[in-house]
Image (tube, rainbow, N blue to C red):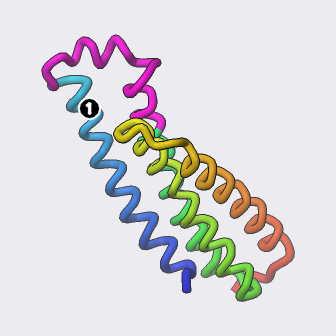
Amino acid sequence: MPNGKTNITAGLLFLAAFMLYGFFLIYMRDFAPGKEQWIAAYATGDHFQSRLAHVHGNLFALLNIVTGFVLMKFRLPAGTERGVSALTLTGMLMPLGILSETLFGAPPIFVLIGGVSMVAAMLWLGLAVWKAEAV
C-alpha cells in the first residue's frame, strides 16, 4: 500500500534521476557535437520537450516528497491517504510521458494521465488537510 514514506522515497529517487537528466541537458548545450543546432532549437521540438520533462520531473518529485510529509503529519482517513498517495505517484507519469513522446514518439496519454492525477491529488489533499487534525 502506498503511504507517505513511499511518496518520499519515490520522490527522492525521481528527483535524483531528473537531476542527472539535467546534467545530460547541460552536456547537450555545452559539450555535445552539434551543440549549436541544439541551442538554436531552444524553444522548439526535442529541446523544448526535454526541458519540459526535466522541469516537471523535478517539480513532481518535490510534490511527492511534500505529499509524503503531509500524509505523515496529518490524521487522514485511510482511503484518503492511500488515494492521495497513489494519485501523486501516478502523477509522475507526466514527465515520463513527455520523455516518451520525445524519445519514442509515444502518444501523450501518459502526460494527460499524470497531469490529471497530480491535480486531483493536490485538490484532494488540500481539502483533506483543511478538515484534518495534525498528528
In the rendered view, tell whether residue 105 sits above or below residue 88: above
**On the picture, is 17 further left or further right than 106?**
left
The residue labelled by disc 1 is 26
Is 35 magenta? The answer is yes
**On the picture, is 27 further left or further right than 122?**
left
Q: Magenta stretch: give its range.
A: 32-52
Residue situated furthest right in the rendering: 131
Which of the 4 image quadrants contains residue 30?
top left
The location of residue 24, given as percent across then percent down, is: 25, 38
Dominant secondary structure of the magenta stretch? helix
The location of residue 67, given as percent across then percent down, is: 60, 68
Which of the 4 image quadrants contains residue 53?
top left
In the rendered view, tell whether residue 112 sits above or below residue 128: above
Is 14 magenta? The answer is no
The location of residue 9, given as percent across then percent down, is: 42, 73
Which of the 4 image quadrants contains residue 84?
bottom right
In the rendered view, tell whether residue 85 sits above or below residue 43: below
Residue visible at 51% across and 65% down in the picture: 65
